[in-house]
Every structure is written in structure tokens, then in C-alpha cells.
Image (cartoon, rainbow, N blue to C red):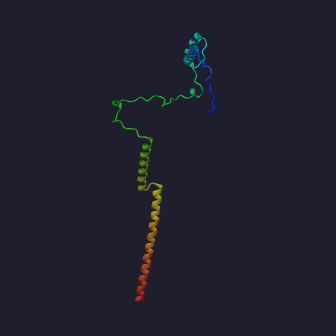
Amino acid sequence: MPRGGKKGYKGRGKQFTNPEEIDRQMKAEREKEENGGAAPESESDSEDESSEEECDRKKKGVEGLIEIENPNRASQKSKKVAEVDLSAPRELSRREREEIEKQQAKERYMKLHLEGKTEQARADLARLALVKKQREEAARKREELRKVKEEAEARGKR
């Protein structure tokens, strides 16, 4: 084998398709497209059958079950500047819409939290009540100890 790994075929004769063969192939392709993919038979029969086949043509595979058009397949027509309506409200993107919904939900939660209607708010209020009660008890004990010390000092001075 020569360098490059390919054999040269430059010495061979060139093959050309004669024009009649090309015309025959092109005519067969056109007939095939007109008939909806059916093989061409006799020309008189194919014209009669082609009108019937277009009406009764069955969709192959899943195509018959699915009746959805691809929205991306339709070409997008460009709008003229005069047709664009700037006063119309602009549609928000999914991310913007989700962000706004998230903020509104947070505000609703904070409002309910301040009213004490959420579970977390109830737990916080219960915890605060417990701490307040403990502080009151501690203050009462300190007051009692102070009174006991004062009485002890008063007895000691007598």
C-alpha cells in the first residue's frame, strides 16, 4: 500500500450516467412524491388511486395517535416596529414569576408569624412564656433570700 493508506484510482476510466437514465430516475421520484410514497404502477391507474390514497392515507406508527404540532416547526414571522405594542404588559419569565411568588409567600408567612398563627410562632411563644415564668421564679427566690438576709442582720444587731 502506498503512503497515506489509500490506493489511487486515477488510472481507471470514468463512469457517466446517460441523460435518459437521469430523466427516468427524476420522473420516478416525482411520481413517488405525488403518490405519497407509493411505488409507481401504470400511469392511468396511479392517477385514479392517488386521489383516493390522499384521502385514506394512513399515518404510520405513532403518527396516527399523536395529533400535536411542533410549535418550533412553524417559522417565526418578524414583526414590524409599528406593530409592536409597547403599552401591553410584558410577560414575565418563569424565573421572574417564581421569584415574585417566593417573595409573596415569604411576606404571607411573616404576616401569619407575627399574628402567631404559624407552628413556629406558637412554639416561640410557648418558649418565651416558659422563660418568663422561670425568670419570675428566680426573681421571687432572690427576693426571699434578700428578705431572709435582712431579717438575719436585724436579729444580729439586736
Quadrant of image for the C terminus: bottom left
Q: Which corner quadrant of the image does residue 51 belong to?
A: top right
Residue 42 picture location, percent across and down:
60, 11
Q: Residue at image x 45%, y 60%? A: 125
Horizontally, residue 6 falls left or right of residue 125, namely right
Q: Residue at image x 45%, y 64%? A: 129
* 126 up-or-down from 8: above or below: below
Q: Which corner quadrant of the image does residue 50 belong to?
A: top right
For the view shown, which residue lies furthest in the bottom direction?
158
Q: How many marks?
A: 0
Q: Which of 35/28 is in front?
A: 28
Q: Which of 131/32 is in front?
A: 32
Q: Residue at image x 41%, y 56%? A: 114
Horizontally, residue 93 falls left or right of residue 49, namely left
Residue 35 picture location, percent across and down:
56, 17
For the view shown, which residue lies furthest in the right direction?
1
Q: Which corner quadrant of the image does residue 80 belong to?
A: top left
Quadrant of image for the N terminus: top right
Residue 141 picture location, percent across and down:
45, 75
* 158 up-or-down from 40: above or below: below
* 83 up-or-down from 57: above or below: below
Q: Which of 118/31 is in front?
A: 31
Residue 17 picture location, percent across and down:
59, 16
Q: Residue at image x 56%, y 12%? A: 47
For the view shown, which residue lies furthest in the top direction?
44
